[in-house]
Amino acid sequence: MSRPRVLVLGAGVAGHTAAAFLKKWLGKEAEITVISPRPDYNWIPSNIWVGVGLLKPSQVMFPLKPVYARKGITFYQAKATTLHPEGEGEDATPFVEAESTEEGRMGELLKVPYDYLINATGPKLAFEATPGLGPKGHSLSVCTAPHALEASLALDEAVARMKKGERQRFLVGTGHGTCTCQGAAFEYIVNLEFELRARGVRDLADITYLTNEFELGDFGMGGIHIRRGGFVTPSNIFTESLMAERGLRWVTQAHVKRLEPGCAYLEFLNGEEGEERFDLAMLLPPFKGVGLKALDRQGQDISERLFAPSGFMRVDADYQAKPFEDWMASDWPRTYQSPAYKNIFAAGIAFAPPHPVSQPRQSPNGTVITPAPPRTGMPSAMIGRAVARSIYGMIYGSDTPMSTASMAEIGAACVASAGSNPFRGTAASITVFPIVPDYERYPEFGRDLNHTFGEIGLAGHWIKILLHHLFLYKAKMLPFWSFIPE
């Protein structure tokens, strides 16, 4: 009997985690293959430090090929384009079409068969959603290490002008009304402010935080409540206090209509319009699916069967449209298995959420100005491991997925640190449980306040530095890597 073949699309946090655990648990009993368009692994949370010049790209990245070769995982540097979950013609073997992105083989077509498939392709950075957004337009990004390096070099230029006495305006936040990852923008702005102070030019900087959140501290999770000092504090107070202490201005409920050199043109939730002038803007893009297609055995397009309109993959969630008041924690997926094909799973950002967590809102013009739910970092890793465990069980005879990781049943921790030196810096540390609020289990606040808290101080800063090194060590699958938690 031939060995089962598990194909993982994507080598980000979710895909890399899934492939690593599958190889650990299955060893030579299965063939593990990873397809990723980039040759390197990037620990994306530390791109923030690259973006302010505290780290080099080489300190947050490493080549995948030698790591996979050492562990016996097959690796193709390619971009997956089309799923064939039923095979093709008379051959019922499922496979994925991909185009090589490897130097010297660019554009070469690959057909990779599988018995089990994990879609962990992550997001397409949809800069085109806002005219003028992104590194090819008039703003910067920290979504990739090269983008973050560009942001660092632009910051150096701004500081040089400030040292000559020129005042500079910095605009940081979200570049579209449907963006997610507000936490990354939040962390970047506190690092930016910290670094400007360290370079002795803070007094010449006007720094503004621009966000699609209804109020600060929403983070795409509808906000949280934190028990501190005997009081329950909403996250907007926690976040506003942190911003005010650092002299940061903020603008909420905003959608960026377009960017021109030095100016962001805005539409607000109340329908009014405005603009924000800047000398340097770091604005995050919205996310979409990467554009995978699916064809049946006859070559007919069945993409709508597998993917939501956003391009993300449908899984075991309740996608029925209903009023915000009727949304429930149980709507969220638990196994991340495709309802159309039981041997296909999605992990991390690649799965389609059933609905936003934050209350959906539109301007009078019909423009959606609502944060999308976060699915990066810790949740992606936990989902990747759970999916890998389910496939392991199915290979050994289980009829159904054996592991779950509903975002309504798991927690997450986020550490937004300023500075990368262990002896100078600070961090805002937040844990939340569960990620998606469950008002049936926790009627008052939707979450367990015994496991939801926030603190600001040096200890969280040390944890952030430690996590940077630990997670890169784990990703390299060095000795005892699996003992490091997700």
Image: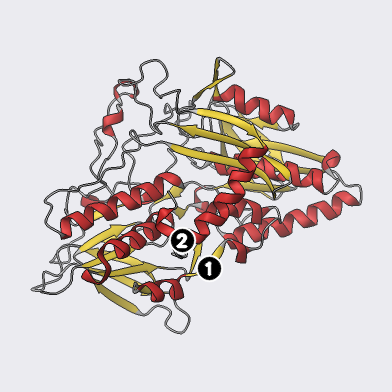
- The part of the image, by quadrant, that contains residue 272 is top right
Q: Which label was assigned to residue 475? A: 2
At a point 52% along the width and 40% down the height, the residue shown is 414
Q: Which mark is residue 82?
A: none
Q: Secondary structure at mark 2?
A: helix
Q: Could you say where residue 152 lies in the image, as x and y percent from the top left?
A: 70, 57
The x, y position of residue 378, in whole percent, is: 44, 45
Q: Is residue 136 visible?
A: no
Q: In the image, what residue type sits under mark 2?
A: Ala
Residue 53 in the image: state x and y as whole percent.
71, 56
Residue 415 placed where, x, y %? 57, 41
**Residue at the disc numbered 1:** 62
Is label 2 or label 1 in front?
Answer: 2
Which callout, 2 or 1, points at the residue further toward the start of the chain? 1
Reply above or below: 163 against 36. Answer: above
Amino acid type, residue under disc 1 in the picture: Phe
Q: Nearer the viewer, residue 345 or 448?
A: 448
Specify the farthest residue to the left: 90
| Residue at 61 percent of width and 28 percent of height | 239
- What colour scheme governs how the chains and residues are painted in the rendered image of this protein? secondary structure
In the foreground, 409 or 219: 409
Q: Residue furthest right?
A: 164
Position of residue 375 in the picture relative to residue 252 (left or right): left
Which residue shows up at 37% across the image and 58% down it?
Answer: 15
Which residue occupies the foreground of this view, 34 or 428?
Answer: 428
Q: Determine crowd level at label 1: few under 14, some 14-19, many 20+ residues with C-alpha closer than 10 A.
A: some
Q: Quadrant of the N terminus?
A: bottom left
